[in-house]
Image (cartoon, grey):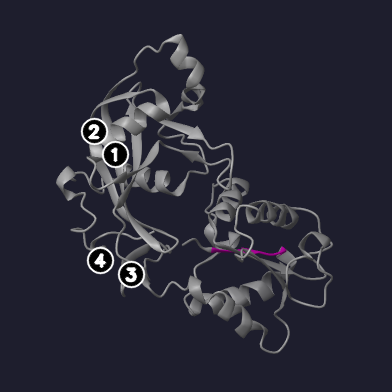
Amino acid sequence: MGHIFVSYAHEDEKAVLELYHKLKKEGFHLWIDKYDILPGQDWESQIKSAIRASSRFLAFLSNQSVKKRGVVQKEIKLALETLDEFPENQIFLVPIRLDECEVPTKLSRLHWLNIFESGGYEKLASLLSMYKEDSTTFENNGTPLYPTNTLPKPSQLIASTILVIRKRHENGEILLKSIRKGYASGTYTAPTQDCNTETGLEDCAKQSLFEETGIELLSSRPVSLYYLRSDSNIYLSVGILVEKFRVPKITRAQALISDHWYEWKWYDLTKIPSPLAKETDIAIQQYLNNKYNNLDWNDIQPIQTPLSQLALF
Protein backbone atom coordinates (compact mmCIF):
# COMPACT_ATOMS: atom_id res chain seq x y z
CA MET A 1 0.00 0.00 0.00
CA GLY A 2 1.40 3.39 -0.98
CA HIS A 3 2.01 6.48 1.10
CA ILE A 4 -0.19 9.52 1.71
CA PHE A 5 0.92 12.53 -0.36
CA VAL A 6 0.71 15.92 1.39
CA SER A 7 0.10 18.91 -0.93
CA TYR A 8 0.20 22.45 0.46
CA ALA A 9 1.25 26.01 -0.30
CA HIS A 10 4.42 27.05 1.51
CA GLU A 11 2.51 29.97 3.02
CA ASP A 12 0.57 27.29 4.96
CA GLU A 13 3.67 25.33 5.93
CA LYS A 14 3.44 25.99 9.67
CA ALA A 15 -0.15 24.76 9.97
CA VAL A 16 0.38 21.77 7.67
CA LEU A 17 3.61 20.65 9.37
CA GLU A 18 1.83 20.71 12.71
CA LEU A 19 -0.76 18.29 11.31
CA TYR A 20 1.95 16.27 9.54
CA HIS A 21 3.92 15.65 12.75
CA LYS A 22 0.75 14.81 14.65
CA LEU A 23 -0.24 12.22 12.05
CA LYS A 24 3.30 10.78 11.90
CA LYS A 25 3.27 10.27 15.66
CA GLU A 26 0.12 8.23 15.24
CA GLY A 27 1.89 6.01 12.70
CA PHE A 28 0.65 7.27 9.33
CA HIS A 29 2.89 6.82 6.27
CA LEU A 30 3.13 10.34 4.83
CA TRP A 31 5.13 11.87 1.98
CA ILE A 32 5.96 15.59 2.06
CA ASP A 33 8.44 17.54 -0.05
CA LYS A 34 10.15 19.21 2.93
CA TYR A 35 11.46 15.89 4.28
CA ASP A 36 11.27 13.42 1.39
CA ILE A 37 13.15 15.21 -1.38
CA LEU A 38 16.91 14.92 -0.91
CA PRO A 39 19.50 17.56 -1.83
CA GLY A 40 20.46 17.24 -5.49
CA GLN A 41 17.29 15.41 -6.54
CA ASP A 42 15.09 16.78 -9.32
CA TRP A 43 12.19 18.03 -7.17
CA GLU A 44 9.65 18.12 -10.01
CA SER A 45 10.24 14.50 -11.06
CA GLN A 46 10.27 13.39 -7.41
CA ILE A 47 6.90 15.04 -6.79
CA LYS A 48 5.38 13.49 -9.92
CA SER A 49 6.69 10.05 -8.94
CA ALA A 50 5.46 10.42 -5.35
CA ILE A 51 1.94 11.40 -6.49
CA ARG A 52 1.72 8.45 -8.88
CA ALA A 53 2.93 6.06 -6.17
CA SER A 54 0.56 7.40 -3.49
CA SER A 55 -2.60 5.70 -2.23
CA ARG A 56 -4.14 8.94 -1.04
CA PHE A 57 -3.60 12.63 -1.83
CA LEU A 58 -4.32 15.32 0.77
CA ALA A 59 -4.87 18.75 -0.81
CA PHE A 60 -4.60 21.36 1.95
CA LEU A 61 -6.45 24.51 0.88
CA SER A 62 -6.53 28.02 2.29
CA ASN A 63 -7.37 31.55 1.16
CA GLN A 64 -3.70 31.89 0.27
CA SER A 65 -3.25 28.65 -1.68
CA VAL A 66 -6.42 28.73 -3.82
CA LYS A 67 -5.42 32.10 -5.31
CA LYS A 68 -1.83 31.07 -5.93
CA ARG A 69 -0.40 29.85 -9.23
CA GLY A 70 2.45 27.37 -9.39
CA VAL A 71 3.47 24.03 -7.90
CA VAL A 72 0.34 23.43 -5.80
CA GLN A 73 -1.93 23.76 -8.83
CA LYS A 74 0.33 21.40 -10.80
CA GLU A 75 0.17 18.83 -7.98
CA ILE A 76 -3.63 19.01 -7.86
CA LYS A 77 -3.84 18.69 -11.67
CA LEU A 78 -1.68 15.55 -11.61
CA ALA A 79 -3.71 14.17 -8.68
CA LEU A 80 -6.93 14.64 -10.66
CA GLU A 81 -5.39 12.79 -13.59
CA THR A 82 -4.35 9.99 -11.24
CA LEU A 83 -7.86 9.94 -9.73
CA ASP A 84 -9.22 8.94 -13.15
CA GLU A 85 -7.30 5.66 -12.81
CA PHE A 86 -9.20 4.73 -9.61
CA PRO A 87 -12.61 3.02 -9.38
CA GLU A 88 -15.45 5.54 -8.85
CA ASN A 89 -16.20 4.39 -5.32
CA GLN A 90 -12.57 4.57 -4.13
CA ILE A 91 -11.27 7.62 -2.29
CA PHE A 92 -7.96 9.07 -3.49
CA LEU A 93 -7.98 12.89 -3.52
CA VAL A 94 -9.19 14.57 -0.32
CA PRO A 95 -9.60 18.40 -0.27
CA ILE A 96 -8.92 19.71 3.26
CA ARG A 97 -9.79 23.31 4.11
CA LEU A 98 -7.52 25.06 6.60
CA ASP A 99 -9.86 28.07 6.76
CA GLU A 100 -13.10 29.38 5.22
CA CYS A 101 -11.68 29.43 1.69
CA GLU A 102 -13.56 28.80 -1.54
CA VAL A 103 -12.87 25.34 -2.94
CA PRO A 104 -11.58 25.50 -6.55
CA THR A 105 -14.14 24.49 -9.18
CA LYS A 106 -12.02 21.53 -10.31
CA LEU A 107 -12.27 20.06 -6.78
CA SER A 108 -15.85 21.08 -5.99
CA ARG A 109 -17.31 17.71 -7.03
CA LEU A 110 -15.38 16.09 -4.17
CA HIS A 111 -16.61 16.28 -0.60
CA TRP A 112 -14.11 18.27 1.45
CA LEU A 113 -13.07 18.18 5.10
CA ASN A 114 -12.89 21.29 7.31
CA ILE A 115 -9.88 20.63 9.51
CA PHE A 116 -10.46 23.87 11.47
CA GLU A 117 -13.86 22.74 12.76
CA SER A 118 -14.36 20.84 16.00
CA GLY A 119 -13.59 17.16 15.39
CA GLY A 120 -11.91 17.95 12.05
CA TYR A 121 -8.62 16.25 12.92
CA GLU A 122 -10.40 13.19 14.30
CA LYS A 123 -12.33 12.83 11.04
CA LEU A 124 -9.08 13.01 9.06
CA ALA A 125 -7.35 10.44 11.27
CA SER A 126 -10.33 8.10 10.95
CA LEU A 127 -10.34 8.49 7.16
CA LEU A 128 -6.64 7.58 6.98
CA SER A 129 -6.74 4.77 9.55
CA MET A 130 -6.05 2.05 6.94
CA TYR A 131 -2.74 3.73 6.07
CA LYS A 132 -1.06 3.40 9.46
CA GLU A 133 2.52 2.16 9.51
CA ASP A 134 2.23 0.36 12.84
CA SER A 135 2.05 -3.09 11.23
CA THR A 136 5.69 -2.66 10.26
CA THR A 137 8.91 -1.59 11.96
CA PHE A 138 10.57 1.30 10.12
CA GLU A 139 14.19 2.32 9.77
CA ASN A 140 15.19 5.97 10.31
CA ASN A 141 14.76 6.72 6.60
CA GLY A 142 11.18 5.47 6.61
CA THR A 143 11.91 2.21 4.78
CA PRO A 144 9.75 -0.71 6.01
CA LEU A 145 11.97 -3.38 7.54
CA TYR A 146 10.34 -6.19 9.51
CA PRO A 147 6.62 -6.88 9.97
CA THR A 148 5.67 -7.11 13.64
CA ASN A 149 2.14 -8.52 13.39
CA THR A 150 0.09 -10.84 11.19
CA LEU A 151 0.26 -10.04 7.50
CA PRO A 152 -1.49 -11.66 4.53
CA LYS A 153 -0.07 -14.95 3.34
CA PRO A 154 2.37 -14.40 0.45
CA SER A 155 0.84 -14.85 -2.99
CA GLN A 156 1.81 -17.82 -5.14
CA LEU A 157 2.93 -15.29 -7.75
CA ILE A 158 6.53 -14.05 -7.73
CA ALA A 159 7.05 -10.55 -9.09
CA SER A 160 10.30 -10.53 -11.03
CA THR A 161 12.34 -7.53 -12.18
CA ILE A 162 14.90 -8.40 -14.86
CA LEU A 163 18.12 -6.37 -14.82
CA VAL A 164 19.86 -6.59 -18.20
CA ILE A 165 23.33 -5.07 -17.73
CA ARG A 166 26.13 -4.93 -20.25
CA LYS A 167 29.75 -3.90 -19.69
CA ARG A 168 30.37 -1.55 -22.59
CA HIS A 169 32.56 0.64 -20.37
CA GLU A 170 33.76 0.85 -16.75
CA ASN A 171 30.39 1.76 -15.24
CA GLY A 172 28.19 -0.62 -17.19
CA GLU A 173 24.79 0.05 -18.78
CA ILE A 174 21.27 -1.10 -17.89
CA LEU A 175 18.27 -1.64 -20.16
CA LEU A 176 15.22 0.50 -19.30
CA LYS A 177 12.20 2.05 -20.97
CA SER A 178 9.91 4.96 -20.15
CA ILE A 179 6.27 4.07 -19.43
CA ARG A 180 4.06 6.14 -21.72
CA LYS A 181 0.52 5.51 -20.46
CA GLY A 182 -1.44 5.08 -17.23
CA TYR A 183 -0.82 6.30 -13.70
CA ALA A 184 2.89 5.41 -13.94
CA SER A 185 3.40 7.45 -17.13
CA GLY A 186 6.84 9.04 -17.19
CA THR A 187 8.53 6.52 -14.90
CA TYR A 188 11.34 4.21 -16.07
CA THR A 189 11.19 0.46 -15.65
CA ALA A 190 13.24 -2.64 -16.27
CA PRO A 191 11.48 -5.68 -17.82
CA THR A 192 9.06 -7.18 -15.28
CA GLN A 193 6.86 -10.25 -15.08
CA ASP A 194 4.67 -12.05 -12.53
CA CYS A 195 5.61 -15.73 -12.47
CA ASN A 196 3.65 -18.57 -10.91
CA THR A 197 5.63 -20.64 -8.40
CA GLU A 198 4.70 -23.78 -10.31
CA THR A 199 6.61 -22.43 -13.30
CA GLY A 200 10.41 -22.29 -13.24
CA LEU A 201 11.37 -18.70 -12.46
CA GLU A 202 14.33 -18.72 -14.87
CA ASP A 203 12.15 -20.04 -17.71
CA CYS A 204 9.48 -17.48 -16.94
CA ALA A 205 12.04 -14.65 -16.95
CA LYS A 206 13.57 -15.94 -20.19
CA GLN A 207 10.22 -15.97 -21.99
CA SER A 208 9.20 -12.57 -20.60
CA LEU A 209 12.50 -10.92 -21.52
CA PHE A 210 12.28 -12.09 -25.13
CA GLU A 211 8.63 -11.04 -25.49
CA GLU A 212 9.32 -7.57 -24.07
CA THR A 213 12.72 -6.78 -25.57
CA GLY A 214 13.66 -9.40 -28.18
CA ILE A 215 16.69 -10.37 -26.07
CA GLU A 216 17.51 -14.04 -25.52
CA LEU A 217 18.54 -14.85 -21.95
CA LEU A 218 21.40 -17.38 -21.74
CA SER A 219 22.27 -17.32 -18.01
CA SER A 220 21.06 -15.40 -14.96
CA ARG A 221 21.07 -15.29 -11.17
CA PRO A 222 18.94 -13.65 -8.44
CA VAL A 223 20.45 -10.47 -6.95
CA SER A 224 17.53 -8.86 -5.12
CA LEU A 225 14.85 -10.21 -2.78
CA TYR A 226 12.08 -8.51 -0.77
CA TYR A 227 8.36 -8.61 -0.10
CA LEU A 228 6.11 -6.17 -1.98
CA ARG A 229 2.71 -5.17 -0.61
CA SER A 230 0.06 -4.52 -3.26
CA ASP A 231 -3.52 -3.85 -2.12
CA SER A 232 -4.38 -6.81 0.16
CA ASN A 233 -1.67 -9.12 -1.21
CA ILE A 234 2.01 -9.58 -0.50
CA TYR A 235 4.31 -10.77 -3.27
CA LEU A 236 7.80 -12.14 -3.06
CA SER A 237 9.72 -9.90 -5.45
CA VAL A 238 13.03 -10.95 -6.95
CA GLY A 239 15.54 -9.01 -9.03
CA ILE A 240 17.19 -11.16 -11.71
CA LEU A 241 20.56 -10.23 -13.17
CA VAL A 242 21.04 -11.35 -16.77
CA GLU A 243 24.70 -12.39 -16.85
CA LYS A 244 24.77 -13.57 -20.47
CA PHE A 245 22.38 -12.73 -23.26
CA ARG A 246 22.12 -12.62 -27.03
CA VAL A 247 20.36 -10.13 -29.29
CA PRO A 248 19.24 -12.22 -32.27
CA LYS A 249 18.62 -10.78 -35.71
CA ILE A 250 14.92 -10.35 -36.31
CA THR A 251 12.96 -10.80 -39.49
CA ARG A 252 10.97 -8.04 -41.17
CA ALA A 253 7.74 -9.70 -40.00
CA GLN A 254 8.97 -9.78 -36.39
CA ALA A 255 9.93 -6.12 -36.59
CA LEU A 256 6.45 -5.16 -37.79
CA ILE A 257 4.72 -6.83 -34.84
CA SER A 258 7.36 -5.97 -32.24
CA ASP A 259 7.69 -2.19 -32.43
CA HIS A 260 7.77 -2.06 -28.62
CA TRP A 261 11.23 -3.71 -28.71
CA TYR A 262 12.62 -0.38 -29.89
CA GLU A 263 11.31 1.45 -26.81
CA TRP A 264 14.11 -0.05 -24.70
CA LYS A 265 17.30 1.97 -24.30
CA TRP A 266 20.66 1.56 -22.55
CA TYR A 267 21.50 3.90 -19.65
CA ASP A 268 24.80 4.39 -17.80
CA LEU A 269 24.52 2.85 -14.32
CA THR A 270 25.89 6.07 -12.82
CA LYS A 271 23.35 8.21 -14.74
CA ILE A 272 20.13 6.27 -14.31
CA PRO A 273 17.07 8.36 -15.26
CA SER A 274 14.32 9.15 -12.78
CA PRO A 275 11.75 8.58 -11.56
CA LEU A 276 12.12 4.80 -11.47
CA ALA A 277 9.29 2.34 -10.93
CA LYS A 278 9.41 1.11 -7.32
CA GLU A 279 10.32 -2.51 -8.14
CA THR A 280 13.06 -1.43 -10.55
CA ASP A 281 14.49 1.07 -8.07
CA ILE A 282 14.66 -1.46 -5.22
CA ALA A 283 16.17 -4.19 -7.42
CA ILE A 284 18.87 -1.85 -8.76
CA GLN A 285 19.78 -0.57 -5.29
CA GLN A 286 20.02 -4.06 -3.80
CA TYR A 287 22.14 -5.18 -6.76
CA LEU A 288 24.50 -2.19 -6.54
CA ASN A 289 24.85 -2.63 -2.77
CA ASN A 290 25.54 -6.38 -3.13
CA LYS A 291 22.83 -6.98 -0.54
CA TYR A 292 22.15 -10.51 -1.79
CA ASN A 293 25.43 -11.35 -3.51
CA ASN A 294 25.28 -15.02 -2.50
CA LEU A 295 21.61 -15.58 -3.28
CA ASP A 296 20.74 -18.94 -4.82
CA TRP A 297 17.75 -19.96 -6.93
CA ASN A 298 16.77 -22.38 -4.16
CA ASP A 299 16.23 -19.38 -1.87
CA ILE A 300 13.38 -18.08 -4.01
CA GLN A 301 10.48 -19.82 -2.26
CA PRO A 302 7.63 -17.58 -1.02
CA ILE A 303 6.25 -20.17 1.36
CA GLN A 304 9.66 -21.04 2.87
CA THR A 305 10.86 -17.45 3.20
CA PRO A 306 9.54 -16.00 6.52
CA LEU A 307 8.12 -12.49 6.30
CA SER A 308 10.36 -11.43 9.18
CA GLN A 309 13.53 -12.11 7.20
CA LEU A 310 13.04 -9.67 4.33
CA ALA A 311 12.25 -6.00 3.84
CA LEU A 312 8.61 -5.19 3.12
CA PHE A 313 7.83 -2.30 0.75
Residue 151's tag is: 3
- Sequence-wise, the earlier of marks 4 and 2 is 2
The percent coordinates of residue 211 (x first, y second) are 39, 28
Q: Amino acid at mark 1?
A: Ile
Say whether marks 3 and 4 touch (CB < 8 Å). Answer: no
Residue 240's tag is: 1
**Residue 296 is at least partly visible in this image:** no
Which residue position holds label 4?
Answer: 308
- Sequence-wise, the earlier of marks 3 and 2 is 3
Identity of the residue drawn at 74% across and 67% down? 11
**Residue 117 is at least partly visible in this image:** yes
| Tag 4 secondary structure | helix
Identity of the residue drawn at 42% across and 30% down? 212
Horizontal side of residue 226 vs 110, given as left or right: left
Image label count = 4
Residue 220's tag is: 2
Say whether marks 3 and 1 touch (CB < 8 Å). Answer: no
Q: Amino acid at mark 3?
A: Leu
CA separation, marks 3 and 2?
31 Å
Q: Which portion, as a residue range, is magenta?
A: 4-9
Could you say which quadrant of the image residue 227 lies in? Answer: bottom left
CA separation, marks 3 and 4?
10 Å
The percent coordinates of residue 197 (x first, y second) are 25, 48
Say whether marks 2 and 1 touch (CB < 8 Å). Answer: yes
